Image: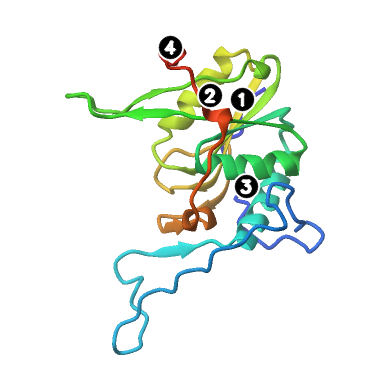
Amino acid sequence: MATKRATPKVTKGKPSQKQVEKLVSIPPDVVLAPQVEAPRHATGRDQSRARTQVQELTWAQFDRAVQTLALAIRQSYSPGAVVGVAHGGVFVGGALSSALGAEFFPVRISRRSRDKGQVKPKLSGEMPRELKGKRVLIVDDVVASGDTLELAVALARKAGAREVHTAALLSRPDGYEPDFYALSTDALVVFPWDYEAVAEDGRFDVDPDKAGA
């Protein structure tokens, strides 16, 4: 039951039309915010990428990336539950759970870095009890250091998960590499939900008395 780190990069090639299907997690009546144009200088020449490369992702591109990612996951793993790390991982995880036909659970991982002399931020969180005995896929939108995913994996195992794999929509080339990912780039990626306010519901409410348990 070895974890395959060297997963095929799912960005190669484009999915067929049959593979690109509308996700249940994206409501048909959602109002998509317009993409922001890259700033241009007086010369009319686009120099916005001269210093920092910016890559904007539309909902349609997000949909295709998730479907392709789901196809790659199915080849070697069949999760019974998908855990999305708030807040970006909730969008990706929710979409993946629909594509994979698995239960979805949103979680929040807290990061605290105000302690003096602390090299890494202190991470804390908890997993739902429903993960016990299940194959679990932990999902985030962007993975760099991997601290959040590593903690989430540890918490899922502590909750009794049978097997745990990780996935992300975007992985940094020189950073932590999840088991599955759709994009690998150093560019600043602007996701479609970055244009809209995120309304979180009661699923993220944590009892303060239990948060430190």
Q: Amino acid at mark 1?
A: Val
Q: Is residue 158 above or below residue 165?
A: above
Which label belongs to residue 8? Answer: 3
Residue bearing mark 1:
164
Rendered-image quadrant of the N terminus: top right
Viewer-side residue, 123 vs 33: 33
Residue bearing mark 4:
209
Per the model, the C-alpha gap separating discs 1 and 2 is 6 Å
Q: What's the residue at 56%, 20% (across, down)? A: 127
Q: Amino acid at mark 2?
A: Val
Per the model, the C-alpha gap separating discs 2 and 3 is 22 Å
Q: Quadrant of residue 28?
A: bottom right
Q: Quadrant of residue 54?
A: bottom left
Label 3 sits on a secondary structure element that is: loop
Q: What's the residue at 47%, 27% (across, down)? A: 150
Do the residues bearing badges 3 and 4 touch, measured as CB atoms within 8 Å?
Answer: no
Q: How many marks?
A: 4
Q: Nearer the viewer, mark 4 or mark 2?
A: 4
Q: Amino acid at mark 3?
A: Pro
- The numbered mark, 4 or 2, whose residue comes first in the sequence reads 2
- The numbered mark, 1 or 4, whose residue comes first in the sequence reads 1
